[in-house]
């Protein structure tokens, strides 16, 4: 009896592997029309945001220096793929969306895969057209039709019991290791924000963040919980409440509790938004207000996270690539 051959791809944003890679990383990110949406024609947007990326790269280089001169995302993703390949006894490749120097190798690898089906696992628990959707579009534009026909996506897993368990165990570990009284503790979840109009035009991200938040909070019925959104970029309204605002207004919602655990809800790997933004921008605000603050690390390479991925990969309700792509401004014209 013939057995279907299955291969896997773990997909992520990528992150600068050195200080020199900050600028090309930002150029790739900020010129992505699924991330930065304007009414400009493609070549105009690309020119404008390359200039912005150059300026921003100089500004944030010092932030990367503070976290070791690189982002851990690339290395986490590669190691997770290796660990999964050992457990699955199957080929597991990686794709790093904004590390353009890695794309040629990925395209060669996926074209050589001896597989009837390629299951794509996004390292983004909550779906957005700006993350998972952007990668699906890249695939649509760069993969051959016969490869695209083999691709099956796990769209997202915001309420998956194994994903929820992985973060629940991390939070419990912080509570136990620091001997925190649950009656004096708040769980402060911070997700990466997106523009409000993304949601108003059909993006599921906000509702899926709320699913993850509520599911985790069910495991902590005696703790107070709050959800905010961080990393706002540029003008315009983004998802609220903003994490920074919640930090400044903490006395209004913590109900007198003095222990705050900050959980990076939409981040599965620590990187600049957790290691610098949360640590250096948000934690000091809360400490200045005399709160005891504990940053919960992202899932990184935790064994419970590897186990969760293995379970999520058993999902049978998979989607084809085209189902995850937002129709762009240029296409509508």
Image (cartoon, rainbow, N blue to C red):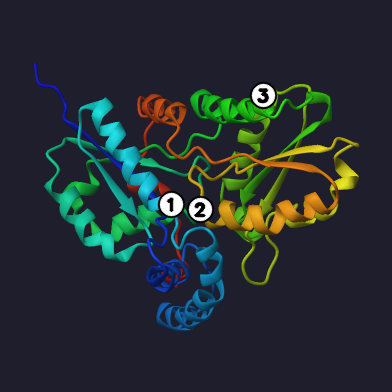
Residue at mark 2: 271
Q: Nearer the viewer, mark 1 or mark 3?
A: 3
Task: Relative to 27, say whether 155 is above or below.
Answer: above
Q: Residues within 10 Å of mark 3 (few under 14, many from 20)?
A: few
| Image coordinates for residue 209, horizontal then vertical, percent | 61, 41
| Image coordinates for residue 4, horizontal then vertical, percent | 16, 26
Q: Residue at x 37, y 34 (%)?
A: 318
Residue at mark 1: 72
CA gap, disc 3 and disc 2 = 25 Å
Q: Residues within 10 Å of mark 1 (few under 14, many from 20)?
A: many
CA gap, disc 1 and disc 3 = 27 Å
Q: Nearer the viewer, mark 3 or mark 2?
A: 3
Quadrant of residue 196 in the image? bottom right
Residue at mark 3: 176
Assess whether mark 2 and mark 3 are in contact (beta carbons under 8 angstroms): no
Task: Relative to 161, say whether 32 is above or below.
Answer: below
Mark 1, secondary structure of its residue: loop
Task: Tell me: 306 left or right of 49.
Answer: left
Q: Residue at x 27, y 60 (%)?
A: 102
Q: Earlier in the sequence, mark 1 or mark 3?
A: 1
Assess whether mark 1 and mark 2 are in contact (beta carbons under 8 angstroms): yes
């Amino acid at each position: 009896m013939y057995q279907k051959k299955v291969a896997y791809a773990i997909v992520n944003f990528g992150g600068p592997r050195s200080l020199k890679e900050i600028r090309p990383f930002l150029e790739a990110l900020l010129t992505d029309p699924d991330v930065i949406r304007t009414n400009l024609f493609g070549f105009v947007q690309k020119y404008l945001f390359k200039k912005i990326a150059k300026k921003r790269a100089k500004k944030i280089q010092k932030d990367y220096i503070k976290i070791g001169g690189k982002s851990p995302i690339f290395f986490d993703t590669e190691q997770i793929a290796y660990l999964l390949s050992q457990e699955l006894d199957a080929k597991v490749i990686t794709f790093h969306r904004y590390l353009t120097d890695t794309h040629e190798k990925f395209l060669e690898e996926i074209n050589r895969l001896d597989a009837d089906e390629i299951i794509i696992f996004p390292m983004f628990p909550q779906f957005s057209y700006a993350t998972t959707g952007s990668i699906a579009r890249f695939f649509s534009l760069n993969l051959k039709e016969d490869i695209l026909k083999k691709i099956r996506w796990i769209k997202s897993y915001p309420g998956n019991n194994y994903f929820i368990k992985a973060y629940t165990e991390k939070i419990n570990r912080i509570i136990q290791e620091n001997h925190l009284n649950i009656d004096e503790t708040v769980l402060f979840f911070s997700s990466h924000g997106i523009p409000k109009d993304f949601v108003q035009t059909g993006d599921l991200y906000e509702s899926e963040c709320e699913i993850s938040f509520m599911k985790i909070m069910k495991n902590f019925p005696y703790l107070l919980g709050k959800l905010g959104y961080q990393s706002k970029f540029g003008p315009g309204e983004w998802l609220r409440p903003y994490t920074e605002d919640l930090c400044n207004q903490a006395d209004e919602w913590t109900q007198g509790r003095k222990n705050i655990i900050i959980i990076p809800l939409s981040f599965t790997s620590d990187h600049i938004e957790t290691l610098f933004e949360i640590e250096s921008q948000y934690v000091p605000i809360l400490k200045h207000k005399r709160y005891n603050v504990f940053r919960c690390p992202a899932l990184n390479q935790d064994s419970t996270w590897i186990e969760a991925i293995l379970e999520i990969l058993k999902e049978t309700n998979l989607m084809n690539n085209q189902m995850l792509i937002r129709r762009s401004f240029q296409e509508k014209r």
